[in-house]
Image (cartoon, grey):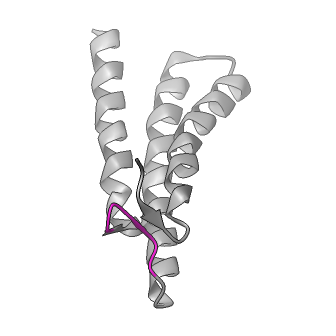
Amino acid sequence: MVKWSGSDCLLGPLLVLGLIVDVVVQGLFDGKQLVTDIGRVAGFVLSAILIRMIGRGLNRRGTKHTLYDAPMQNYWWLAMTCVVLTLALVLVLRL
């Protein structure tokens, strides 16, 4: 059971944004490996930044936007974990 309050249900779509950026970059640059790898990482970095900024903005108004009683802006680490895992995957596949 997921426990959230306010607009914290935005976390999922903001994380998926990282994958959407990856697909768009692949389409724009015809799947070139270096650009695609950068697009994957950049998408999750963008997700982390947006989660932090949107969460701080929503919780600044005095309302509670939480997931499992933690404020929304504290979940930026989840997107950064995706960045680290994506970088590790890219490095392993390139070696």
From this view, report whether residue 26 is shown above or below residue 48.
above
Closer to the camera in the image, 6 or 75: 6
Assess whether residue 8 is covered by the magenta stretch: no
Q: Residue furthest bottom?
A: 62
Please state if 84 lies on the left or on the right of 19 as rendered: left
From this view, report whether residue 93 is shown above or below residue 89.
above
Residue 80: percent from left, percent from top = 33, 47
Please state if 44 lies on the left or on the right of 36 as rendered: left
Q: Quarter of the image holding residue 19?
A: top right
Q: Residue furthest right?
A: 28
Residue 46: percent from left, percent from top = 50, 52
From this view, report whether residue 20 is shown above or below residue 71.
above
Q: Residue at x 33, y 60 (%)?
A: 68
Residue 43: percent from left, percent from top = 52, 42
* Count of numbered marks: 0
Residue segment shown in magenta: 64-69
Q: Residue at x 30, y 53 (%)?
A: 77
Please state if 10 lies on the left or on the right of 62 as rendered: right
Q: Residue at x 55, y 41 (%)?
A: 16
Q: Quarter of the image holding residue 25?
A: top right
Residue 45: percent from left, percent from top = 43, 49
Please state if 68 lies on the left or on the right of 21 as rendered: left
Q: Main secondary structure of the magenta part?
A: loop
Closer to the camera in the image, 60 or 29: 60
> Is the C terminus in the top left, top right, bottom left or bottom right quadrant?
top left
